Amino acid sequence: MSKIPFSELETAAYCPRKLYYRRRDDIEVPDEVAERRDVAFRYGDLLAGPDERLADLPLSVSPAEFRSHLDYARGRFDAAWSEIRDPSERERLVEGKDCRGVVHKVLSLDAPTPAMVFTGDPPEQGVWEPQTVRAVAAAKALSWESGQPVERAFVEYPTHGAIREISIGTRRKAAYRRSVNAVRSLDGPPPRLTNDAKCEACDYRAECGVKTRSLKSLLGL
C-alpha cells in the first residue's frame, strides 16, 4: 500500500473534499511559501541583528514583536532551543508505516524530534488541528525509521516568530488516524461540509457549491 504524503493528511484533516480538488488540480507550492519558511532557519541571526535586517523579510508582525516571540521561545525551550535554531538535519525525507514526507527540522533530543514549519498565522494558543496532524505524521514516521518512541513535536510559525510544542498523545493520534482513514477511503468527491467556518476561507468554495450562512441569518435576524 502506498505511503500517504504528509500534505494530504493535513488537507484531509481540514476537509476531505478539499483534498479531492487539490489532487485533481495538482497544486504547486508558491515561491512565497519557500521565502517565509526560510525565516525559520535564520532565528539566531535575526534575533541578534538590527531591525534593518528584518525590514525585507516577509514577517506578519513588527520586528519588535517577532523578536519578543523568539525570545520567549528561547527561554521556554531552553534545552531544545539550540537545535531549533540550528537543527541537526534539515528538510529530511522520511517514511513511516503509513505516510511519508519532508520533516523541516529533525532535532537531536531524547529521540529524533520533528519541528514542522508553517507559513500562515498561528491560533492564539496551541496549533491548528490540520497542522497538528501533519506534525504527528512526522513524529510517527521518525519513530518508525529510528525504532524509538517520539512523544513530542514542535510547530513553528516563522513569520510571527512563534514556536509551539505539542505532545503526541491519544487525542492527537486519533485525529491522525482519522485523516489516514479519510485519505485511504477517498474515491470521488466526499460530502460537502455544512455551514462550516472553514468554507469561508477555502479556495474551492465556489466550485464546491457549499452554502454558508451569514451571521445575520444564524442569529435569526
Image: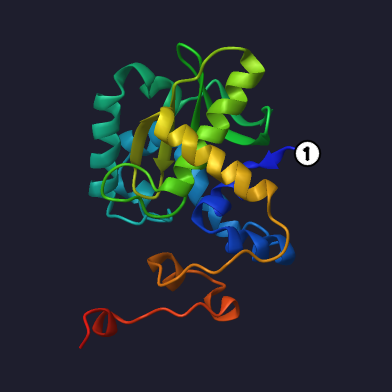
Q: Say how the picture is coloured.
A: rainbow
- 113 over 130 or under it: above or below: above
**Quarter of image, res 3:** top right
Task: Pick the residue in front: 171 or 146.
Answer: 171
Q: Residue at x 37, y 31 (%)?
A: 166
- 3 over 63 or under it: above or below: above
Q: Residue at x 62, y 27 (%)?
A: 141
Direction from residue 185 to residue 132 in the image, left or right = left
> Does residue 33 appear anywhere in the picture?
yes
Direction from residue 184 to residue 72 in the image, left or right = left
Given the image, on which type of amino acid does mark 1 rest?
A: Ser
Q: Tell me how many marks there are.
A: 1
Task: Pick the residue in front: 70 or 157.
Answer: 157
> Does residue 41 appear anywhere in the picture?
no
Direction from residue 73 to residue 91 in the image, left or right = right
Residue that mark 1 sits on = 2
Image location (x, y in percent) of residue 192: 54, 69
**Circle 1: is it few (<14), some (14-19), or many (20+) Cα within 10 Å?**
few
Image location (x, y in percent) of residue 61: 30, 55
Q: Residue furthest bottom?
A: 221
Q: Quadrant of the C terminus?
A: bottom left
Q: Quadrant of the N terminus?
A: top right
**Quarter of image, res 59:** bottom left
- 181 over 103 or under it: above or below: below
Image location (x, y in percent) of residue 33: 54, 54
Q: Residue at x 69, y 41 (%)?
A: 4
Q: Secondary structure at mark 1?
A: loop
Image location (x, y in percent) of residue 210: 51, 77
Task: Pick the residue in front: 72 or 172.
Answer: 172
Q: Residue at x 41, y 27 (%)?
A: 169
